[in-house]
Image (cartoon, rainbow, N blue to C red):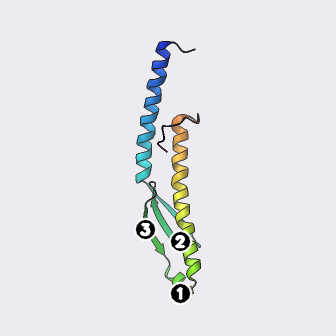
């Protein structure tokens, strides 16, 4: 069992972890992540918040006339950028919590 002082210490540490995680989440939400597809013929930049920032499509892709291929490449590049943001968030959360699998109160 925990003694009174230990529970208070544990609660204080939990609050500090939660504050650290909240700051880290805000920082990552502002970071930009890049996804590419088709040998970098399509490049998508997204913020860690999930907001798309830009999409670049090589002019050669339009010359192919294959609309479905262009759509698939844009989708693949966007998903890659968003996946990288999510992985960064998970890595940083694991670093903060020491891999303890602590629930950070719905922050993520």
Residue 93 drawn at (x, y percent)? 52, 41
| Residue 19, quarter of the rendered image | top left
Which label number is shown at residue 54? Answer: 3
Label 3 neighbour load within 10 Å: few <14, some 14-19, many 20+ = few
**SS type, badge 3:** strand
The earlier-in-sequence mark between 2 and 1 is 1
Residue 27: give x, y in percent of width and height. Answer: 41, 47
Circle 2 SS class: helix
Residue that label 1 marks = 63
How far apart marks 2 and 1 lie (CA) works out to 16 Å
Residue in view at x 50 percent, y 62 percent: 34
**Residue 104 in sight in this render:** yes
Circle 3/circle 2 CB separation < 8 Å: no
The furthest residue to the front: 106
| Marks 2 & 1, CB-CB < 8 Å contact | no
- Which mark lies nearer to you, 2 or 1? 2
Residue appearing at x 57%, y 67% in the figure: 76
Question: Vertically, is 81 above or below 9?
Answer: below
Q: Residues within 10 Å of mark 1 (few under 14, many from 20)?
A: few
Gap between marks 1 and 3, in whole Å? Answer: 21 Å
Q: CA distance from mark 3 to mark 2?
A: 11 Å
Q: Earlier in the sequence, mark 3 or mark 2?
A: 3
The residue beneath circle 2 is: 74
Q: Does 32 appear above or below 5?
A: below
Q: Is residue 53 above or below residue 27?
A: below
Q: Earlier in the sequence, mark 1 or mark 3?
A: 3
């Amino acid at each position: 069992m925990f003694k009174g002082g230990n529970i208070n210490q544990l609660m204080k540490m939990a609050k500090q972890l939660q504050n650290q995680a909240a700051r880290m989440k805000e920082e990552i939400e502002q970071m930009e992540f890049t996804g590419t597809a088709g040998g970098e013929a399509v490049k998508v930049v997204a913020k860690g918040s999930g907001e798309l920032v830009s999409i670049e499509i090589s002019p050669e892709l339009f010359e192919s006339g294959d609309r479905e291929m262009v759509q698939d490449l844009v989708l693949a590049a966007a998903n890659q950028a968003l996946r990288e943001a999510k992985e960064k968030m998970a890595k940083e959360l694991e670093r903060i919590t020491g891999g303890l699998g602590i629930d950070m109160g719905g922050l993520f």
